Amino acid sequence: MDATKGLEVPGETLEAEVKAFFDSAPPLQNSDRITQQLDEFIKRNSSPSENGKARRIVCVTSGGTTAPLEQRCVRYVDNFSSGHRGATSTEYFLKAGYAVIFLNRKGSFQPFCRSLPDDPLLECFKPTDESNIQVCEAYSEAVTRAVVDHHTAVAGGLLLKLHFNTIFEYLQMLQIIAVSLRCIGPRAMFYLAAAASDYYVPWKEMVEHKIQSGSHLLDVKLVNVPKMLSVLRNDWAPLAFCISFKLETDSNILLKKASAALEKYKMDAVVANELSSRKEQVVVVTSAENVVVKRDKSRSDNDVENPLIKLLSEKHASYIEHPGR
Ligand code: 9Z3
């Protein structure tokens, strides 16, 4: 998070911090509806598919969370993430036979939209007369592909898209998803590519109205967001296969930080990426080895996510066979 240093809470246990975070969070809108959608999605994808086995389900998180500074929010601290990693990975997970819960920041990159221009609705279509429009020739193939692939995934019950804006929404939704997926044990994967805030202003300590300008000092106290990776691993979905991401701008510390996260949060793998080269290469850090995964420029589907998802899908398959850690 591109933020000021937060307040440490000496001696406070993780459990107390987690409780304080959720107690202070504004209640999630539509939580019953989300739980119902998840239950239906998991049920639908738990009967045997073509290969006689139940489909694996991955929760892909994507985009940056915001930490609001005011309850009636005008200003917030944001986390960098375009959502490209999560959206692209979702496409490759679907290709690999997974059902995908795509938990994404509203307005971030969406699966199947990579070949479209920035403003697809206005740039891909043109009017033929006052009341009719048609797809522009130049985009006709890309639009057809995007619409067909998206429709096939959503209508076929293989892709469930859920949106968040704030860190409060993100973590409440992640909890609901994890607890819902607990019943499928090791068949679930978490692929946590979202850039989640490290610091937040507790809701009850947040001013209601827009902070007035006038002072040269903005005096806002941010506290640490509790380390939910531990909670996900230990409490919410202990049997799930968990992949987290480590982002650094200094490549000299990247692998050390990724290994530390692997051990501290008992992840099955940590994907280490450096900001400027993140679309070219990543390193998959596991307790057994570090695997460098590079974009294969000779292919048409040459995103780094292609070999990355292949590798993680293989690791997940062998984890399902031998679930011990
Ligand atoms: C990532 O590292 C993602 O790969 C990126 C993808 C955000 C770099 P884009 O969305 O970029 O394609 O533009 N995500 C996790 C970032 C993060 O905040 N990780 C935390 C950390 O590094 C741990 S949860 O400490």
Image (spheres, rainbow, N blue to C red):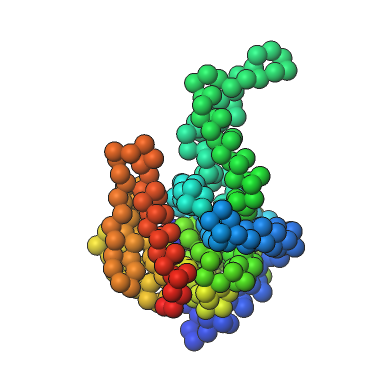
Q: Nearer the viewer, residue 84 or 165?
A: 84
- On-image quarter of the N terminus: bottom left
Residue 163, image x, y percentages: 62, 53
139 to 289, vertically: above or below? above
Say whether residue 73 is visible: yes
12 to 156, vertically: above or below? below
Query: Residue at coordinates 37% horizontally, 76% vertically from top-left?
Result: 263
- On-image quarter of the C terminus: bottom left
Q: Nearer the viewer, residue 102 or 45?
A: 45
Query: Residue at coordinates 37% horizontally, 58% vertically from top-left?
Result: 311
Residue 236, image x, y percentages: 58, 74
Q: Nearer the viewer, residue 315 or 53?
A: 53
Residue 65, image x, y percentages: 54, 57
Query: Residue at coordinates 59% horizontally, 35% vertically from top-left?
Result: 147
132 to 281, vertically: above or below? above
* Residue reaching furthest to the top: 129
Q: Quadrant of residue 123?
A: top right
Query: Residue at coordinates 53% horizontally, 44% vertically from top-left?
Result: 111
Residue 289, image x, y percentages: 28, 68
Say whether residue 227 is visible: no
Q: Nearer the viewer, residue 132 or 252?
A: 132
